[in-house]
Amino acid sequence: MLPAESYLIELSEEADVDAIHYAREFVRAELSAELRSELEALYHANVSSSTDLDFVAMSQRALKNMALSLLSASPNEQAVLLAKQQFSTATNMTDSHAALSVLVNSGDDPAAHAALNEFYDKWHEDAQVLEQWFSVQSTSANLTDLDGLKKLIALPDFELSNPNKVRSVIGAFCQQNLVNFHNESGDAYALLAEYIIKLDDLNPQIASRLMMPLTRWRKFNTNRQTLMLAQLKRIHSKDNLSKDVREVVEKSLP
């Protein structure tokens, strides 16, 4: 596995979010193209219908799914076909979710939406699985920009009063879909602040945890710093601000 974008941002003195994202995607694509035959062999060598939860079976699934993820990082019809096949024949949630994630991030939007619809139809009554359905979309840089996030929030299945739904949609977008969250317009910062203010009256603990991406403002360029600080000040100006949120904001402001 390559280091996550969030880790690379932490290593940077001043993080160039776009450069980090595209450089990481370039490296993944190069590895995918150069190691395609090895990755395909690795994938097929670890295909198993076993649903056992012992160490060997779980390790095989993890290795197989990592190979599939890396295979899909470069334009590769075969990887999409493998993901479709795995998704349709999966006998466990690990394989089903892994294949769904590959399809969502493959750049093949029709295949992504078909899989998302099928997954939803099958699992929408299971709250925990539905949270995975939300998060696989909200964390996808390919599929979900800020407008996409707003569409997820507008779905009937999303509930602002449900902390797990908030974490799997808004929290996941802001902490993992970093190239879209840190868009130079600052619109995503404003949206996050808007929901922190709303949640402050519903669940101050969740609201304070959602603050974390904005508190890292010192890591970014002057434009992003200005935009993030403006949203922190907006939150700070809320009437009857909870103790939880106020403490985080005041520690973050210069």
Image (spheres, helix red, strand yellow):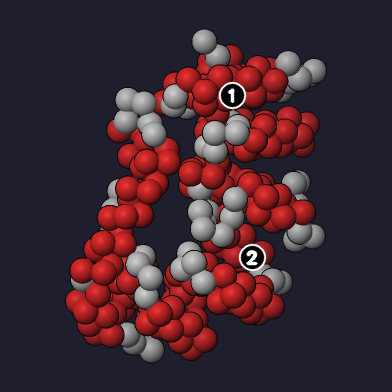
Callout 2: helix, strand or loop? helix
What amino acid does circle 1 point to?
A: Leu
137 is higher (above) or lower (below) than 95: above
Between the residue at mark 1 and the residue at mark 2, the CA separation in whole angstroms equals 33 Å
x, y percent for residue 228: 57, 25
Which sits in the foreground, 178 or 212? 178
x, y percent for residue 140: 52, 57
- In this rendering, position of residue 93 left or right of residue 210: left
Which sits in the foreground, 6 or 107? 107
Quarter of the image that includes the N terminus: bottom left
134 is higher (above) or lower (below) than 103: above
- Tell which tag, 1 or 2, sits nearer the viewer: 1
- In this rendering, position of residue 214 left or right of residue 239: left
The reply to whether the C-beta atoms of the residues labelled 1 and 2 are less than 8 Å apart is no
* Residues packed near mark 1 inside 10 Å, few (<14), some (14 to 19) or many (20 plus): some
- In the picture of the structure, the residue carrying the numbered disc 1 is 227
Q: Residue placed at 49% from the left, 67% from the top?
A: 107
Q: Residue placed at 57% from the left, 70% from the top?
A: 109
Q: Residue placed at 27% from the left, 80% from the top?
A: 40
Q: Which mark is residue 114?
A: none
Instruction: Please tell me in which quadrant of the rendered image residue 118 appears.
Output: bottom right
- In this rendering, position of residue 84 left or right of residue 227: left
88 is higher (above) or lower (below) than 98: below
Q: Which mark is residue 130?
A: 2
Tell me, yes or no, if residue 124 can be seen here.
yes
213 is higher (above) or lower (below) than 112: above
x, y percent for residue 63: 29, 71
Callout 1: helix, strand or loop? helix
What amino acid does circle 2 point to?
A: Leu
